[in-house]
Every structure is written in C-alpha cells, then in structure tokens.
C-alpha cells in the first residue's frame, strides 16, 4: 500500500502563545494526503483551514504534533533546509495573487527559478511556456498591475508550477475572482491535478468547488470535524472495504456544507417525513425548474422531464402531479410578472391608473387561486393591502394581520386558515417577482 | 541566486521609487562630499606649507656642525671627506665671523657668514624681502643679505623691510689672532655693501655674503657648518647616521618636514572628524530609509519566502541594495566634493591673479584618498543595510505576507 505523501499527526497550532491574545488555531489535526490527490480543506473563516495549509507549506511550526512530507519531518530541519521543500516540492497560489508589482509577468513567474539559480534563458523559456499554457502568454512583458484579476491568478498558477513541484497549495484561489475567471482558474487547477498528476491542496469556503476534490476535510473551530469522500471521483487513498461507505450524508454534506453531521441526519429524516421525493429527485427537479424559469425549456418539455423515470435522466414524478406542477408554476411565474410590473411603475406617478388595474389583477389572481368570493368593500380593501405589500409599505406580518382585521378598519375579516393560505401564496409570488440584490 | 539577478532585483527601487532612492543617494553624497572637501582642504593646506618650506634639494641635505667635545674641526679637508662618500653629491661649507655692522652711523654686533650658492640652495634660504643669492652670484662682491633681526637693531619696522633693500652697510670683522687666543684682530672692510635681500631667519643677527668675497678679506681655516647634499632620499638616514657616528651634530630639514606633516595629519584628523559627523548623519538617514524600505517590502519578502527564497537570499537582496546606494552616494559625494574644491581653487586663483598674488591650490584630492572614500561609502552602505537585512531574513513568511 502506497505511503501518504503528506502525513500530519495531532497538529496543534497556537498563535501568540503565552500572550493575552493567545489563540488556538488548530488542535489535534491529523491528515493523510496521497500523491495525486485533490484535497479541499473546507470551512468557514476562522476554522483553521488556512492554518493547516500554511503548516503544510512550512511557515507555521506546530506547537505539538508532526508534519511529514515525503517522509521527512519538515519542522525538525533548519529553516534554510526547509526552503528546499518550499522551492522544489511545493508551489503556492493565494487569494490576493501576491504577484510582485515591480516585476514583469515573465519575471514574476521566473522568480522561483531565480532563487533556484537557474540561468536566464532556461527560466524565461520555462516561464513563457507555462504562461502560454495558462493563456496569459501574450501579456508576459507587462507589469502585473496592468492585468485583470483572472489574468493575475493564472500568472500566479504559472508561477506556482515553474519549479515543477509535486504539491500545489491554493489558498482560496478564486476568492477575488468573478465567476468566469473562477471557472478558468478552477479548470486549470483541475488540469494540474488530473493531467499533470500533481497533488492539490486547496483551501476553500465555496461549496461549489467541492465536486473537484477527491476528498474534503471539513474544519470547524480549529478541528477537522469530518472527512468526506467524493463518490464521483476514483479514490487514490486506499480504502479498506466496508470501512467507510458512501451514504446520503455525503450528498447532503455537499448540499449543506456548513451543517454538522447531526443536522444532516435530522435533515435526512425530516425529508423522509415531509417529502414524497428523495434529495436526488429534488436536486434534479430544481435543475429542470430552473431551466423552465430561465425560458430554456417550455412547458411541455418541463412536463416530459418531470415524468421521465429517474434512471433515464428524468425526475420520476407521476403524470398527474407533473401536469399540476407545470400548470401551477407557469401560472405563478405569469402572476409574478404583474408584481414586477407594479414595482417597476411604482416611481412614476402618471401611470397611477395602470397601477390600480395591476393591483386589481393581482387581487383577482389571488381570489381565483384560493377559490374565494368577496364583497365590494372587501375587494377594495384587498387592492389596498396588496399595493401596500408590493411596494413595501407593509411587511409579511402586517399583511397577514390586515387580512384578518375587520372590514370597516380596512381589513378583510378572513378566518385564520384563509388568511394563512392567501398570505402564503402571495409571499411566493412576491419572492418570484421582486428583484433582490444580495450576494449568493 | 546569481549575482546578475541579485543586482537586477536589488536595483528595482530605482524604477519603483526613484525619488526616494536618489534622495538617499544624495544624502549619502552630501555626507561623503563633506568628508572629501574637508580632507581635501587638509591635503591642500599641507601641500601649500610643504611647498613653502621644501625645496627638493633642501629636503635632501643635512646640516653638519661640529660638537665641541670631540675636537672635530670643519675645514676644507672635512668637506673633501664628506664629498668622498658615495651617497653624497656635494658638500657646501659656511664660514662665520663675529663682526660689527655700521649703518648710517649706527653700529651693532652680528655675524658675517660666507657661503657659496649651493649652500644657500641646500640650506633653503628664502627672502622675505628683496632677492636671494643665486648660482650666478658666486663672484658677487658688492651685495649681502641680512636677517630681519639686524633691521630691528637699526630700528627699522617690519613693514619698512622692503625699503631697506638697496641700503648700504659697512662691516668690521672680529677675528681671533690665533686659535685659543683672546686677542682679537679687527679687520675693517673699507667697502660699502648693498643689501640684496632680507632672509627669514628669526632670532639671529646674521649677514650673508659670498664665500670668495669673505675669503678675500680674511683667511678661513675653519667652517661653521657644512651642508651635505645626499643623492637620494633612501640614503638620507644612512648618511645621517654615519655622520652622527663620526661625532658630528646633524640637523635635517626633512625632520622638520616630518613634524610639519604630523601637525597637518592632526589638522586633517580634525577636518575629517567634522566630515565624519556629516557622514554619520547621512548614514543614519540611510539606515532609516532602509528600515522604512523593509516595512514597505514586508509583504514582498513574505511572497518571496513562500515561493522559495531562502532567508539568505532575502538578506543579500537588502544588503546589496544598500551597498549599491552607499557606493553611488560615495561616488556622487566625490563628484560634488571635488567639483566644489576645483571651483573654489579656480575662484581663488582668479582673485589672486586680480590682486597680483600667487596662485595656490587650496584643495588637493589624491587618487588613493578618493578610491578609499568610494570603498568606504560602500562599507557604510553595507553596515546600514545589514541590520534591516537580518531582520528581513528572519521574518516569518506568513506574518510578512499578511502585512499590509
């Protein structure tokens, strides 16, 4: 059985030891990382994931425990000897790119070779070929501040590979990048792992990246809380049969990366109690509905996909339910458009008349969906209540209260059950129809 | 790291922060410039003084006189003996007799000396007024030189010295009848001598005439002094020791020159101290700049360390940067100092020629000194760089990389 490339045992790392702001960043961390593996150290900020990575890198001597790289305890040797590992065994990329602004792109990439005493012709050739490979060869004679973030990160990927290291360390490499650049950089790192067969250790808090890794170490409050194997990738780490089996929890862990094992078990059970569909079905249904919402597929295609058995790439929903789902969702999306229109015209006073009509239409949708009939006075009041809610004058709670209030005081005098249904449906519409700006 | 890469990486500051780098160099330059100018002034002064008192032949001659004790006599034979020494080029005697001098009815005591022009050269006789005897004056039988004290005897003020040149005086020589006798014969020279020049000898009453002229009035059996001209500097001491061993008293002007040099070394030391203070101030300034540079580059140091730079690479980056800055500072200081010296020299000489004075070189910059200053400033650069460099190399890369 192959020996792990990196063995760390019972690692304790304490910042500012002996001072008043002493802080235990890592306690009792043990990992085995095999050559050629893609490992993600995952956790929220302050979980100790970067600490673990920099400890592997050789910059953070542990208080207790050992760190073996290729069988050698890198903290038992002198700093000057440890440089060998940093120069030839490990390459590193950072969230902030950390290129040196006073040097050209080419010199930045060649810098590790300068420290390795390579002559100029050799290192320029090597640096240029790496820059070409990562798609930034054309800018090699610019200085780094002239480059975009994505370009800078690809330059730093090139720099990390210039001395042909065995291990690539990446400290949240996409944290400062837009989605397009993120994809490019993630693809390059994946290529380094799968094509160049380099061991990749990446620190990340982005759950979307987890599928790249062979294994993910989840860290929380300075401890490794669990190790999750990615069933989609062929494992390099030798696994004894039956020792660990892939369960639904692994799947849930990817869906809810910040939750503890206990929460995930709860989720699994509650899902069974409340849902007719499994997480796999739900995941696929979500994807299909997303396509429908974005207009990529029409209503018929939606129904077809929903009906298609799971094994054949569909969701596996009974036909009657599928039709109902398609009808309801297209109806709701249409009605959500009215809300969008209402909000759009809200700032323009001369279209008041249209606004009133839109509110009336929304009222009609609501009544029709809930199969209700109201008096004239109630109708008028509901238009008011809807308008207030859509423009944001009232919130969800007051909206609900006004539905139950007396008619003479501007309410509808609905029963609790009725107002619950109306409020629930209307909030769904608002969720669809109101453009929100928050970062995902 | 290769030397050329080191040089390239450590001169980046000229591109990234040219203003501060050049100002640092200028600061070092002003400091070393001050040293160069002040020490150059010391060298210049020394040379001026030595040029005043040193004539090539004077330095290479020894003044020999007899010590009473060993009954040695200085006479024509002695002169011949001295000349026989292989390292001696020439020996020129000086005869001396007590005499009375008369000027416009006033009479006083003095010594009349007789010497040939080579003696005058070897002894380094110079005139404070009028002219000195030259080689053509050997047959001169009408002119004499007087020491300044003789003029005082006649009540002539120092500022009237020049006017005394051309005046006429008469002598009566006082010659002992025979050796060891108390009987003194008075020889009256019935002739007026014209004052050709005033010497610079202080505290003695002397009149100097050509030896043949003196000999025409009195028989000379014994000399007072003999100036021995040694052929080269390296035998000066050998000849001197031989003479002393033979029982003569020897005085050498080179000794005086040595003493003068010592004094001027002292003067130079004082000037160099002032320059050194200026240099120290600029070195502290440079040290400060290097420390600030360290802070500024902390992040960069962290980056370099994590991508494979050894601590000693970081150290050499800093040290070589400060050595380069220090050396350039030294060179610019030399340029500034020498330029200032040359300009002041030029202006002094223009002024001197305007007022009819002699041109002088107040500043002097020996090449060896300038080379030393250039190297020394590089050493100062090294010393100011080594401390920040050591600190930079021991920074924890992770702390450094997170430094903003």
Image: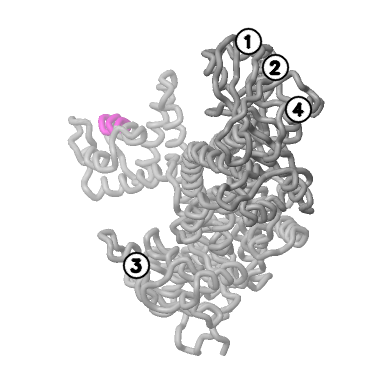
Q: Is A100 placed left or right of A20 in the picture? A: right
Chain under disc 3:
A
- The answer to whether the residues at label 1 and label 2 have Cβ atoms under 8 Å apart is no
Task: Give the residue number, with chain letter if any, for mark 3.
Answer: A14
Q: Residue at x 32, y 72 (%)?
A: A262
SS state under label 2: loop
Marks 1 and 4, how far apart at CA: 29 Å
SS state under label 4: loop
Choose between B368 and A215: the one closer to the eye.
B368
Mark 1 or mark 4: which comes first in sequence? 1
Is residue A44 inside the magenta stretch?
no
SS state under label 1: helix
- The answer to whether the residues at label 1 and label 4 have Cβ atoms under 8 Å apart is no
The magenta segment is A377-384
Marks 2 and 3, how far apart at CA: 114 Å
Q: Is B79 placed left or right of A193 in the picture? A: right
Task: Give the residue number, with chain letter if any, for mark 4.
Answer: B216
Residue B274 x, y percent position in the rendering: 48, 37
Choose between A372 and B111: the one closer to the eye.
B111
Inspect this view and state whether residue A83 appears: yes
Marks 1 and 2, how far apart at CA: 24 Å
Residue A176 x, y percent position in the rendering: 52, 50
Marks 3 and 1, how far apart at CA: 97 Å
**Mark 4: few, some, or many residues within 10 Å (few <14, many ≥20)?**
few
Marks 4 and 2, how far apart at CA: 12 Å
Tag 3 and tag 1 share a subunit? no
Chain under disc 2:
B
State which quadrant residue B201 falls in.
Answer: top right
Task: Give the residue number, with chain letter if any, for mark 1.
Answer: B163
């Amino acid at each position: 059985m192959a020996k792990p490339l990196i063995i760390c045992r019972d690692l304790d790392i304490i910042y500012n030891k002996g001072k008043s702001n002493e802080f235990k960043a890592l306690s009792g961390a043990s990992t085995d990382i095999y050559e050629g593996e893609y490992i993600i150290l995952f956790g929220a900020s302050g979980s100790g994931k970067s600490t673990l990575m920099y400890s592997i890198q050789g910059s953070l001597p542990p208080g207790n425990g050992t760190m073996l790289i290729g069988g050698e305890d890198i903290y038992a040797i002198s700093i000057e000897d440890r440089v060998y590992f940093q120069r030839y065994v490990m390459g590193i990329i950072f969230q902030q790119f950390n290129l040196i602004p006073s040097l050209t792109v080419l010199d930045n990439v060649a810098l590790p070779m300068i420290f390795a005493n390579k002559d100029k012709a050799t290192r320029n050739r090597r640096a240029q070929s790496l820059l070409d490979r990562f798609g930034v060869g054309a800018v090699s004679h610019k200085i780094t501040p002239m480059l975009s973030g994505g370009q800078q990160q690809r330059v730093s990927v090139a720099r990390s590979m210039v001395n042909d290291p065995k291990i690539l360390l990446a400290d949240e490499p996409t944290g400062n990048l837009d989605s397009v650049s993120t994809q490019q950089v993630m693809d390059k790192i994946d290529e380094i792992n799968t094509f160049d067969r380099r061991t990749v250790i990446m620190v990340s808090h982005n759950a979307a990246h987890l599928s790249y890794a062979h294994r993910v170490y989840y860290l929380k409050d300075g401890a490794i809380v669990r190790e999750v194997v990615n069933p989609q990738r062929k494992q390099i780490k030798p696994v004894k049969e039956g020792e660990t089996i892939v369960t639904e929890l692994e799947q849930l862990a990817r869906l809810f990366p910040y939750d503890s094992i206990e929460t995930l078990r709860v989720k699994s059970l509650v899902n069974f109690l409340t849902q007719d569909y499994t997480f796999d079905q739900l995941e696929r249904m979500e994807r299909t509905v997303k396509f429908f919402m974005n207009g990529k597929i029409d209503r018929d295609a939606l129904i077809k996909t929903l009906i298609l058995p799971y094994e054949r790439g569909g969701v596996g929903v009974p036909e009657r339910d599928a039709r109902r789902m398609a009808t309801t969702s297209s109806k709701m999306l249409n009605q959500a458009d009215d809300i969008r229109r209402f909000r759009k015209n809200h700032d323009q006073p001369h279209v008041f008349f249209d606004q009133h009509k839109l509110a009336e239409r929304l009222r009609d949708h609501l009544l029709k969906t809930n199969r209700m009939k109201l008096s004239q006075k109630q109708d008028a009041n509901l238009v008011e209540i809807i308008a207030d809610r859509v423009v944001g004058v009232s919130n969800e709670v007051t909206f609900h209260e006004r539905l139950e209030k007396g008619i003479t005081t501007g309410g509808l005098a609905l029963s609790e059950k009725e107002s619950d249904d109306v409020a629930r449906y209307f909030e769904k519409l608002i969720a669809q129809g109101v453009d929100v700006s928050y970062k995902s | 790291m290769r030397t050329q890469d080191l040089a390239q990486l450590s001169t980046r500051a000229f591109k990234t922060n040219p203003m501060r780098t050049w100002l640092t160099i200028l600061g070092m330059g002003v400091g070393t410039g001050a040293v160069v100018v002040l020490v150059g002034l010391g060298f210049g002064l020394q040379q001026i003084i030595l040029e005043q008192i040193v004539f090539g032949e004077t330095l290479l001659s020894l003044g020999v006189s007899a010590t009473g004790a060993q009954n040695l006599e200085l006479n024509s034979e002695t002169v011949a003996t001295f000349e026989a020494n292989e390292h001696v080029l020439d020996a020129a005697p000086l005869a001396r007799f007590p005499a009375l001098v008369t000027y416009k009815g006033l009479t006083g005591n003095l010594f009349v000396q007789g010497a040939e022009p080579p003696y005058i050269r070897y002894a380094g006789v110079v005139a404070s007024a009028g002219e000195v005897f030259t080689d053509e004056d050997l047959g001169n039988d009408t002119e004499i030189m007087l020491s300044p004290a003789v003029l005082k005897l006649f009540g002539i003020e120092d500022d009237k010295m020049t006017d005394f040149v051309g005046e006429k005086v008469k002598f009566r020589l006082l010659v002992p009848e025979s050796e060891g006798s108390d009987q003194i014969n008075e020889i009256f020279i019935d002739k007026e001598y014209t004052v050709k020049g005033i010497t610079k000898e202080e505290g003695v009453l002397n009149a100097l005439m050509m030896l043949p002229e003196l000999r025409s009035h009195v028989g000379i059996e014994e000399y007072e002094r003999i100036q021995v001209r040694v052929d080269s500097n390296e035998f000066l001491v050998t000849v001197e020791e031989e003479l002393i061993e033979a029982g003569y008293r020897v005085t050498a002007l080179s000794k005086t020159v040595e003493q003068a040099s010592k004094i001027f070394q002292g003067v130079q030391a004082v000037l160099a101290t002032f320059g050194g203070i200026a240099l120290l101030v600029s070195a502290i300034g440079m040290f400060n700049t290097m420390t600030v540079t360290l802070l500024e580059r902390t992040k960069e140091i962290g980056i370099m360390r994590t991508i494979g730079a050894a601590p000693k690479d970081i150290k050499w980056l800093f040290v070589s940067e400060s050595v380069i800055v220090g050396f350039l500072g030294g060179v610019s200081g030399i340029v500034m100092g020498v330029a200032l010296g040359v300009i002041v020299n030029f202006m002094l000489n223009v002024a001197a020629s305007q007022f009819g004075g002699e041109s002088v070189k107040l500043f002097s910059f020996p090449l060896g000194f300038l080379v030393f200053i250039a190297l020394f400033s590089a050493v100062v650069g090294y010393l100011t760089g080594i401390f920040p460099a050591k600190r930079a190399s021991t920074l924890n890369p992770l702390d450094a990389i997170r430094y903003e």
